Amino acid sequence: MIEGEGGFRLLVDSGPDFRNQMLNCGLSHVHAVLYTHPHSDHIGGLDELRAINRVIETPLPLLAAPDVLEELRLRYAYAFAPWKGPEFYRPVFDEHVVQPGETVTFPGLTARIFEQRHGRITSLGVRCGNFAYSTDVETLSDESLSLLEGVQTWIVDCFQYEPHPAHAWLERVLEWRERLGAGHVILTHMGPEMDYQTLRQTLPAGVEPAYDGMVLDLQD
């Protein structure tokens, strides 16, 4: 989740444990959701968004690429049926198509969308000021890397130590960091071999593993 000035909250994906994540962090609502790609570990909590509707009392803006929206409508057809209101017995969305290269503006938050290669599919990354978030990425084009230049804090996929066909691995992430000059890199989407304590002891300065409930206070 990315929170901008004034408290606007952009949720990036909703995994199967989304409800528990919100409760554990003491959060009751978000203002919009961006889906990066349609894999189940990133969309499995979509039904829980009905609780967000009840708090904000309006359809929730949902942003996704065209193919992702199509997949969401297929898997969660009931959530995208015409809403007759006023009750929110199921999720209700205000759908918005986004494409790589677009800039999306919210109150107090500007998000630049960029393309990522994730195995056989494309996922979306997002940059907000000097912060960027790149889950589920194996390859970044020169265009996407150019968009990331100057980023100061970058949360990025790092599944394992060895090369992987769909996820970035440690050596690749460190190469990207050197190219971009990113001062603070946080590894996410780590596989079982990526032991937290071992990584804390062995990663170079400025690189660290993420953990559940991690909060970053960023000044643009």
Image (tube, rainbow, N blue to C red):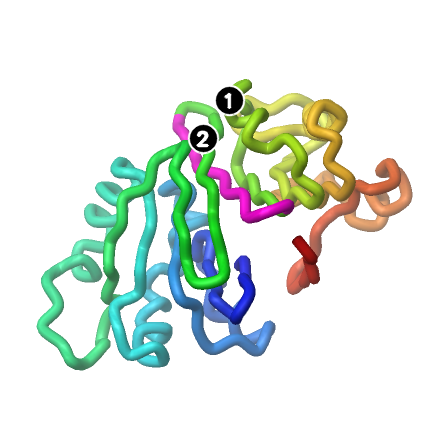
**Range shown magenta:** 121-130
> Mark 1 or mark 2, which has the lower sequence index?
2
Which amino acid, mark 1? Glu
Q: Secondary structure at mark 2?
A: strand
The residue depicted at 45 percent of the width and 30 percent of the height is: 115
* Direction from residue 188 to residue 80 in the image, left or right: left
Q: Quadrant of residue 3?
A: bottom right
Percent position (x, y) of residue 150?
A: 67, 35
> In the current view of this chain or complex, which residue is farthest to the right?
201
* Direction from residue 44 to residue 111 in the image, left or right: right
Label for residue 115?
2
Percent position (x, y) of residue 10?
A: 46, 59
Q: Is there CB contact under 8 Å for labels 1 and 2?
A: yes
Percent position (x, y) of residue 4?
A: 54, 62
Q: Is residue 8 magenta?
A: no
Q: Nearer the viewer, residue 70 or 61?
A: 61
In the figure, 81 relative to 27: above or below?
above
The residue depicted at 23 percent of the width and 70 percent of the height is: 90
User: Gap in Å between the C-alphas at discs 1 and 2?
Assistant: 9 Å
Dot 1 crowding, Cα within 10 Å, few <14, some 14–19, many 20+? few
Q: Secondary structure at mark 1?
A: helix
Label for residue 143?
1
In the figure, 50 relative to 43: above or below?
below
